[in-house]
Amino acid sequence: MPSSDNDNAYQPKWWKEAVVYHVYPRSFKDSNGDGIGDLNGIASKLDYIERLGVSVIWLSPHFDSPNADNGYDVRDYRKVMTDFGTMADFDALLKGVKQRNMKLILDLVVNHTSDEHAWFQESRKSKENPYRDYYIWRPAKYEHEPNNWTSFFSGPAWTLDPATDEYYLHLFAAKQPDLNWENPKVRREVYDLMRFWLDKGVDGFRMDVIPFISKREGLPDLPPEYLARPQFFYAMGPNLHEYLREMNREVLSQYDVMTVGEAFGVTLEQTPSLVDQRRHELNMIFNFDVVLLHSEGVRRRAWTLPELKAIYTSEDKALDTNSWNTVFLSNHDNPRVVSAFGDDSPAYRAASAKLLATMLLTLKGTPFIYQGDELGMTNYPFTSIEQFDDIQVKNGWKAEVLTGKVTADEYLAGLRGTSRDNARTPMQWDGSPNGGFTTADKPWLAVNPNYTEINAAREVQEAGSIYNYFAEMVEFRRKTPALAHGVYRDLDPQHANVFAYTRTLGSETYLVVLNFSKNDTDYLLPGGIEAGTLKISNLGSSEGNVAVLKLKGWEARVYRQTP
């Protein structure tokens, strides 16, 4: 049953009260002048992260990798990528995190490996090789691929390997062959590598595309209705729950950890089957309904505030007190939050970034902040395909532009609003060359040219900055249990510009009012209520206990209501 106003029976857990800060190592901070971010660079900025007040750092893959997909193609799970440093550097980073009373979770990428992983190198040698069944091999079907499955990075999900004249499956790049989870040896290998990192002291995992690990029996063709959205066909295979319960039983239950699954292809209705605490699978998942509001493939999509509100209400109704949610608006796979959901023009960037921080940190679920969002970093002004690094973009260019399906201008126009590389440009630390990210002449990906205006050095020092507002909101959430566990209620679902909702725990109710518009608005609170005592305002308002709020453009306020 969904939560009711009298149902606050959530069991406290550290990962429910946590605020997570997501670090993309390649783009965070370069410590050795090679143009690539690294572990020592992250370690050098731990005080900056700690000052935000967050309690958990999520590290995108740092494992040994040839970087076909920026570390999401793992060559050796027990080694550190040379670009990022050494195992000693990782140990020092972990120690620094713990010394600051924060926790560290890692990216677990086990739907696939790199084709340079030792297992795959053995697997492709012969059909009789002991590692052959670690991956998914099939003979040709009528001199073509074994089925019509497509890769998320364009083209077929199968590549023919001449050594044995069979195809191997890869739902992503050809250099990312899918593991065969039906093989119990593969599962034991995964559990062993999980223990390796947990025994070092890490505090859990974000699990990359974890709903894809169980394939449909017989690998049937994609039905026509799934051709445009294959993720819903690939996800939630017949043995997924069995594998996750086994993983929990064999590994996760032995440690005090948090787990969050990247649940691409999982519907809201399916979510409780993964996160209900009585099932002993995952703690929570990332549902993508919100972050996909602003895009259709590479094209931007006009979204409305009632659509956004409806998603949060649906999530609240679908998840009872045995299930836990995540709240996120951006990550390394999505554009910059202020460009996607706010207004990144100079006049409104700061106000809208603070409004989005207010929403992120007052909704129900564990909030995830992506590096740079606390500075209000914006999308990059891309003008040519050569400026992109993302394999998804490059493959899409070949499939869409070079075949004449769309023009170069159309494709680039879409990418400027939707590309993953928008979020992967280096962190803007100060106003020095390359934003203080690196001393190299050229970083691995260009720094956004607005770094002279938008950077951490300026933000940390200015009392009213986005960074300091994030810190204020994180602290407010930390000391306000109602914002973690309180009942959520949308007061005005159909209002086109104002998002007004309450969070209630026992006798405490907090009212959040967000003006998702650059227009000033006189907003009559629904139901004849009055606002209460003003606790937070992103624009310095002092308007107190009134029934009509005079909201400025992109204004956010939080009130404590009188019982």
Image (tube, rainbow, N blue to C red):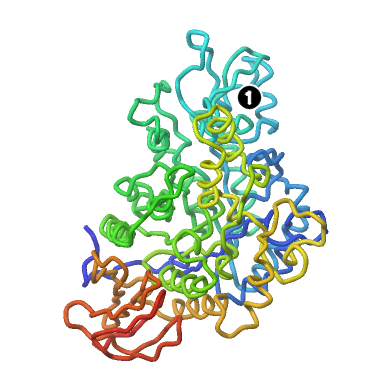
Residue furthest left in the image:
527
Q: Nearer the viewer, residue 149 or 276?
A: 149
Residue 482: x %, y % from top left: 35, 76
The image shows residue 515 at horizontal and vertical percentages of 36, 73
Using the image, determine if residue 407 lies above or below residue 542: above
Measuring 61% from the left and 51% from the top, which residue is drawn there? 382
- Name the residue at 39% across, 21% down: 220
Say left or right for 348 vs 33.
left
Q: Residue at x 43, y 55 (%)?
A: 283
Query: Element type at marker 1?
Result: loop
In the displayed structure image, the side of residue 394 where residue 528 appears, left or right: left
Q: Quadrant of residue 392?
A: top right
Question: Which quadrant of the view contains residue 24?
Answer: bottom right
The residue carrying mark 1 is 131
Residue 399 location, quadrant: top right
Residues 302 and 174: in front is 302
Q: Is residue 464 left or right of residue 275?
A: right
- Residue 20 on image: x %, y %: 53, 65
Q: Name the amino acid type tagged 1.
A: Tyr
Left or right of 527, for residue 511: right
Q: How many marks?
A: 1
Q: 61 or 346: which is nearer to us? A: 346
Q: Position of residue 54 (x, y in %)?
A: 55, 71
Q: Nearer the viewer, residue 14 or 338?
A: 338
- For the C terminus, the image quarter is bottom left
Q: Residues within 10 Å of mark 1 (few under 14, many from 20)?
A: some
Q: Quadrant of the N terminus?
A: bottom left
